[in-house]
C-alpha cells in the first residue's frame, strides 16, 4: 500500500471516529424541558355593553317600521342626553315580518306586522350604566326590550401584561421543580410562545334595583388569562 493511500485511509478513519463521538455530544446539548402554563389576573370591568331592541306591531309593515323608527329616535335622544357618543351606538339589524295568531286547530291569521331595530350600546363609564338603562327604558316604553347588559374591560392592556408575567412565573417555577426532581439545572430559554390571545371571562349579566327603584349594574370581577409555552435547555 502506498504512503498516499495510507494517509487517505487514516483520514477516513479519523472522520468516522469523529462522527461517532459527535452524536453523543449533540444529544447532551439538545436536552430540554418544555412547560405550558397559564397566568390569570382579576380586574373590575370599567365599561358596560347594552343590547336593546325597539319593536312595534302595526297593521302594515310601513306603519310598524315608522313606529319603530320613532321609538328608536327617542332612545337615541335619551342616549345623547346621557352623553353617550354616537360612535358607541351601533344598529345590529332592522327587520319587518308578519305577526301571526295561531288557533287551536292549527290555522293561523296575520294580525299585523312586527318591525324591529336592534342596538348595541357601549357605556364607557360603568358607574353610569344603570342610569342609562333607566333612561332608554323610559324613552322607549313598552316598545323597547333590554336584551342584555354585560360589564367588560374597555382596555385590558395592563391586565394582559400582568397575566403574562404570572404565566411566565408559573412556567419557570414548574420547570425548576421538574429540574430539581431530575437532578439537573435549567439553562437558557430556547423559545417562548403565547398559545392564544388573552382570554376574557366576563361576569354574568347583572341587573338589580335599589330601594329607590334605580337600576344598578353589578360589575363583579373579570378574569384575564394568558397561556404560554416555554422551553429551557438543561445543563
Image (spheres, rainbow, N blue to C red):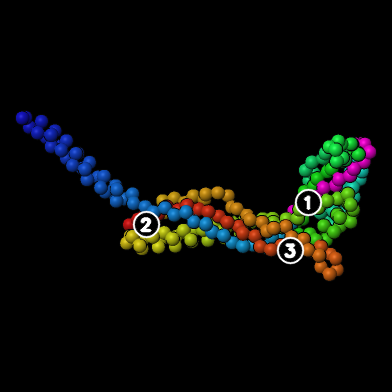
* Of the pair 124 and 56, the residue shown nearer to us: 56
Q: Earlier in the sequence, mark 1 or mark 3?
A: 1
Q: Are marks 1 and 3 in contact (CB under 8 Å)?
A: no
Residue at the disc numbered 1? 147
Residue 218 disc label:
3
Judged left or right of residue 111, residue 27 is left
Question: Disc 3 on helix, strand or loop?
Answer: loop
**Mark found first going from the N terminus, 3 or 2:** 2
Q: Residue at x 85, y 65 (%)?
A: 213
Of 170 and 4, nearer the camera is 170
- Camera-nearest label, 1 or 3: 1
* Residue 8 sits in quarter: top left
Q: Position of residue 231 (x, y in %)?
A: 42, 52
Residue at position x 53%, y 61% in the image = 166
Q: Residue furthest left?
A: 1
The answer to whether residue 47 shows anywhere in this view is no
The spot of residue 17 in percent (x, y) is: 18, 42
Amino acid at each position: 500500500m502506498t504512503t498516499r493511500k495510507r494517509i487517505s485511509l487514516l483520514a477516513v478513519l479519523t472522520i468516522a471516529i469523529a462522527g461517532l463521538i459527535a452524536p453523543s455530544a449533540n444529544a447532551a446539548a439538545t436536552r430540554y424541558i418544555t412547560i405550558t402554563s397559564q397566568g390569570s389576573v382579576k380586574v373590575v370591568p370599567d365599561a358596560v355593553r347594552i343590547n336593546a331592541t325597539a319593536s312595534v306591531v302595526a297593521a302594515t309593515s310601513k306603519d310598524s317600521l315608522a313606529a319603530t323608527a320613532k321609538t328608536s329616535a327617542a332612545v337615541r335622544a335619551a342616549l345623547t342626553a346621557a352623553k353617550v357618543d354616537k360612535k358607541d351606538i351601533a344598529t345590529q339589524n332592522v327587520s319587518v315580518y308578519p305577526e301571526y295568531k295561531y288557533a287551536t286547530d292549527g290555522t293561523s291569521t296575520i294580525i299585523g306586522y312586527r318591525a324591529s331595530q336592534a342596538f348595541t350600546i357601549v357605556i364607557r363609564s360603568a358607574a353610569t350604566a344603570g342610569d342609562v338603562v333607566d333612561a332608554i327604558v323610559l324613552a322607549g316604553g313598552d316598545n323597547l326590550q333590554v336584551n342584555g347588559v354585560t360589564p367588560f374591560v374597555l382596555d385590558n392592556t395592563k391586565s394582559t401584561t400582568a397575566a403574562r408575567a404570572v404565566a411566565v412565573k408559573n412556567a419557570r417555577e414548574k420547570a425548576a421543580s421538574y429540574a430539581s426532581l431530575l437532578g439537573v439545572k435549567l439553562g437558557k430559554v430556547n423559545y417562548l410562545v403565547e398559545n392564544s390571545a388573552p382570554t376574557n371571562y366576563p361576569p354574568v349579566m347583572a341587573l338589580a334595583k335599589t330601594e329607590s327603584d334605580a337600576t344598578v349594574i353589578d360589575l363583579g370581577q373579570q378574569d384575564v388569562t394568558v397561556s404560554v409555552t416555554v422551553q429551557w435547555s438543561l445543563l
